[in-house]
Image: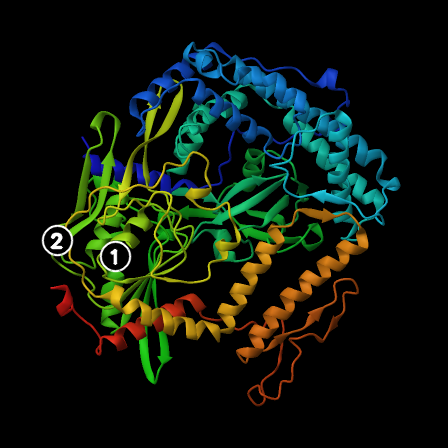
Amino acid sequence: MRSNFAQASLTTLRSGLIALVLLPYGAAHAQEDPAQLNTVLDIEMLYEPVEPLPIHGETAVELLEELQGKHYVSLEINDGFSSQLFDKFLDGLDGSHLYFLKRDVDELSAYRYTLDDALKAGDVTPGFEIYNRYYQRVLERLIYAINRVENAIPEMDFTVDEYLSVDREEAPYATSLAELDEIWRKRIKNSVLSLKLTGDTDEEIQEKLSKRYRNQLSQVLKTNERDIFQAYLSNVAKAVDPHTDYYSPRDSENFNMQLSLSLEGIGAQLTTDEEYTKVVELIKGGPAERGSELKAGDRIIGIGQGNDGEIEDVVGMRLDDVVSQIRGEKGTTVRLNVIPADAVDESGATVVTIIRDTVKLEDQSAKSEVLELSYSGEDYKIGVVSLPTFYFDFEAAARGEDDFKSSTRDVRDLLEELKSQEVDAVVMDLRNNGGGSLSEANQLVGLFIETGPTVQIRYSGIRNGFTRAFGDNDPEVTYAGPLAVLVNRTSASASEIFAGAIQDYQRGIVLGGQTFGKGTVQEIIPMDFGQVKVTRSKFYRISGASTQHRGVIPDISFPDFYDAYDDIGESSLDGALPWDTVRPVEYRPYYSISAMLPQLQEQHRERIEESPDFNYLIDQIERTRRYREREQISLNQERVKAERESNRREEFDAENMRRFLKGMPLREWQDEEAGEEEEATSVAAVDDSDLPSGEDTQASENDEIEEDDPLLLESGRILADFIALNGRRLSAIDRLPGDR
C-alpha cells in the first residue's frame, strides 16, 4: 500500500502528464458523412431531443457520494450548490451568449434550485433538458448561418461603419430572434470579410463558408447521450473546484491514455476557441515542438493527410474529430493550415507540415547547456538545466528495474557534468513546467540542500485537517554553488514546490514571472461507470504559505508574455480554492539573499532599461494586451485593411529596431497587397553608419541569426552580480555568518 506522500506524488504526476497527447473534451466521432453537407435546413426535421439512460442516474448518485466523502472541502449538496451548478453549466454551454435567448434562460431557471434534489434522486433529466435546449438553439443558428452565406454575400456592404462585439461574456442574452439574428449577421459578415481580405471571390467565399457551416451542422447532429451525460456530470464535479472532474467510460479511456509514457501524434495540446481549434501548448521534444513552425496560440483551420492530400476545412468541427484527424501512426505526415497566433485573420494563414512520431517521456527529459557570458570585465560559465516536467516511471520502479526514468536522477547527472565543466553558477529553468511527481520535486530540492523539510501537505475530510511535512533526509549535496530558478505563469504544481523551497531556504534566487498557483493534489477514483478525479489535499511551503491561488512571486520579476493574458493562472479559475497558511516548520536559510535583493534588483533594472530584447518583449506584451482588450472589430473593409497594415508595420518596426540596436541585419518590408519587397521606410530604417563595418544590414528569411534566450542571459548576469556581492565564487554549502 502506498504511503500518503507516494499517493500524492502519483496523482500529481498524472495531472502533470495530461498535456502529453491530443485528447479533447467529449466522445470521439468519425469524420462527417459528405451526404450530410446537403442536409435539409429544417429545424423541425433536424432537432430530436436526447434522452438519458438509467445508468446515468445511478452514476450521478455515486458521484455525489464520492465528492461528499472524499473531497478536500466539506461539501453540502444543497440549493446553493444547485445554483452554482446551474450557472456553470449554462456558462460552459453558451458563455458568449450567442445561442440562448433570454426567455430560454428564464424558463430553464426553474431548475436553478432543484438540480441538487434531482441528482440525489438519481435524476439527470434536468441536465439533459438544459442541454437539449442549447442543442436546438445551436441547430437554429447554424441553419441561419448557412442560409446567410449561401444567399446574402453579394448584398453585404463593407463600406459602412459597423462593428462586431468581441467579448460577449457580460452581454445580456438576446431578447428576440431578430436581435440574435443581428448578432449573427455581423459574425458572418466578419467571416466573409476575413476571406475577402485573402483575395477570395464571393463565389469562393460562399463555397468555403457554406462547407464550413454545413460541416459544423453535421457534427452537431451527431450529439448523443454520451456527450450530454459527460458534459453535465463534468460540470457537477467542477462546481466543487476546477480541478475536480468526472470522466465517462469513453472519456476515462482517453484520460488514461494521457497518462501513458509513450504516445503517437504531433505532441500538442489543443482546445476549442470559439469556432477554431487552438494550440494551447507544444510538448517538449515532440515533433511539433521540434519542427518549430507550429506555435502555442496558433489556430488550426484545415488538415490534410500525407504530402498531397486535400486540406479539409475544420473550422467549427468538434475538437475530438480534429484530434482524430491529427493523430496517426509514427512516420506518417499531416499538414495543418493554421492562422498564426499573431495574425489578425485567415489572410495570414500558412501550411505547416509535421511528421508524426512517438512522444516519449524521454523526449521530455531534463537537458543542459552552458552559456558563456562576458560581464563586468569577467568571463562566466553559466550552466542551464531545463526541466519540462517532474517525471518518474512508477511502473518501471515497481518492477524493480534499475534504470527507470526519474527527473532527479537525470538532473543529478547533468549537474555533475556541469561541475566537471567548472560552471560558475546554475540556472534551473522551470518555465512552462506544469508539474508532475511531488516526490521528484522533493528529491530535486535535496540535490541543492543538506537536509531539511521541503513541503507540507494538508489533508482534510477523513484526516480532519492533518498537516504533514516531507523533506530531504540525504545530507549529500550534488550542487552547492550559486543558483537561480527561472519560472513563468505556466510553471505549476511541483514546479512551485521546488521554487518555493529554494526561495524559503534562500538557497537560490527565483526569477521570472508569478507562477500558476496550483497548490492542490488530485486523486483518481474508479467508479462503476467511469471515474472521478477528486481534490484531496493542499500543498504548503515550509514557510507555511500555500502555493494555491497566489503561486510563487519571484525575487526579481522579468517581463512574462503571459502577462498579456488575464485568463491564465489559478486565480482566473472559477471556484478555485483560496490561499491560506499553516504553521511554518523549522528550517535555516543558506544565504542572506533577502538582504542582497535591493542591490540585485537595482542592477537588473538599470540593465533592462537599456536592453533591446527586454524592451521589445515589454512592447510585445503591451501590443498583445492592447489587441486582446479590443471591445469591437470593424466590419469596414478599408478600415480593417488599414488597421491590419498598421499592426503589421508596428510589429515590423519594433523587430527591426531591436535588430538595429543589437547590430543585427535588418529585415525587408514585404508589401502584403502588392507582393513586392521594398526597403523599410519607418523608424527602423535609421542611419546604418554606426553598424559594424561591412555588415549586411538586410536579413533574408533563410539567413536568420540564432540568438541566446535573453531571459537566460539576464539570469546569468544576476548570478554574476550575486557572486560579486559575495566577494568570491561560492563553490560549497557555506551559510553566511549572519545565518548561523
Residue 505 placement: quadrant? bottom left
Image quadrant occupied by the N terminus: top left
Image quadrant occupied by the C terminus: bottom left
Q: How many marks?
A: 2
Task: Name the residue furthest right.
Answer: 155
The three-letter amino acid code for the residue at tag 1 is Ile
Given residues 293 and 537, the one toward you in this image is 537
Query: Residue 118 at x, y = what percent?
Result: 46, 12
Q: Tell me the CA gap for discs 2 and 1.
A: 16 Å
Residue 439 placement: quadrant? top left
Query: Residue 699 at x, y = what percent?
Result: 62, 75
Considering only vertical position in the picture, is 732 above or below 285? below
The three-letter amino acid code for the residue at tag 2 is Asp
Query: Badge 2: few (under 14), some or many (20 or more) residues near its Cα, within 10 Å?
Result: few
Query: Residue 225 at x, y = what percent?
Result: 54, 18
What residue does disc 2 label? 474
Q: Residue at x 22, y 75 (%)?
A: 726
Q: Is disc 2 placed on a helix, strand or loop?
A: loop
Considering only vertical position in the picture, is 103 above or below 401? above
What residue does disc 1 label? 502
Q: Residue at x 50, y 20 (%)?
A: 229
Locate residue 53 relative to residue 715 in the image: left or right: right
Locate residue 208 relative to residue 413 in the image: left or right: right
Q: Is disc 1 placed on a helix, strand or loop?
A: helix
Q: Which mark is residue 327?
A: none
Using the rendered image of the protein, determine whether residue 261 is visible from the camera's viewpoint.
no
Given residues 416 and 659, the one toward you in this image is 659
Query: Residue 307 at x, y = what percent?
Result: 62, 50
